[in-house]
Image: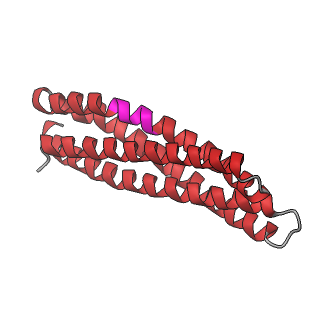
Amino acid sequence: MFTKTDIEKYFVAFKTENLVLMILGAVAVLLAIFFFVYYKTPWHKGFAVPVIVFGMMHCIAGYTNYKKADALRVKNTYTYDMNPSGLRIQELPRLKDFHKTTNKFIYINIGFLIAAIALFIYFRNKPLGEHYMGVATGLFIMAVITLGSSFFMQYKTQGYINGIEAFTKEYH
């Protein structure tokens, strides 16, 4: 049985996951700046490039989603009580779009993982490949973090979608 508590749980998990993503992004940016400024080896400078890019993306995406989580939670708990079919009409399409977007991010990050492994293997024995090995390592680590986050949200979102679909069947 889908209840208001399920809505609350989903958005608390959504907000928490985005807070963690925002914190990881901030730590990544600080780490990248530290590596770029204090460790001036080609590997560290290469490592810093994808880490700062992904870190900033995580900070921005985490902040944006964190900020809108409470408004969505309140709106959907209100809709649950006052207009249950509104969950099917408004929330379900938004969730399905979010689900598709998350799927795209998963495939893009799998591509980043493959690219990171290929870069690492290709530049492993090259005389000037230290910079690119750093890029590959940073890219690999950040892609793994992003994939973990995407899989977690995919799982939570699918459960929420299933709950809304089961609940709104009677209002169809």
Q: Note whether 29 is above or below 141 in the view shown.
A: above
Residue 92 figure quarter: top left
Residue 109 at x, y = what percent? 57, 54
Residue furthest bottom as drawn: 125
Report the magenta residues as a range: 62-68
Residue in the foreground of this view, choosing between 147 and 137: 137
Residue furthest right as drawn: 127
- Which quadrant holds the C terminus? top left
Residue 30 at x, y = what percent? 57, 44
Q: How many marks?
A: 0
Residue in the foreground of this view, choosing between 133 and 9: 133
Q: Note whether 3 is above or below 79 in the view shown.
A: below
Magenta stretch: dominant secondary structure: helix
Residue 125 figure quarter: bottom right
In percent of the image, x 68 and y 66: which residue is there?
117
Can residue 133 be seen at all in this image of the molecule? Answer: yes
In this rendering, position of residue 123 left or right of residue 168:
right
Residue 41 figure quarter: bottom right
In percent of the image, x 66 and y 61: which residue is there?
137
Which colour scheme appears in the figure? secondary structure
In this rendering, position of residue 114 left or right of residue 68:
right
Residue 161 at x, y = what percent? 28, 47
Residue furthest front as drawn: 38
Residue 86 at x, y = what percent? 22, 29
In percent of the image, x 42 and y 56: which residue is there?
151
In percent of the image, x 48 and y 51: which residue is there?
103
In this rendering, position of residue 104 left or right of residue 98:
right
Is 165 colored magenta in this rendering? no
Can residue 100 be seen at all in this image of the molecule? Answer: no
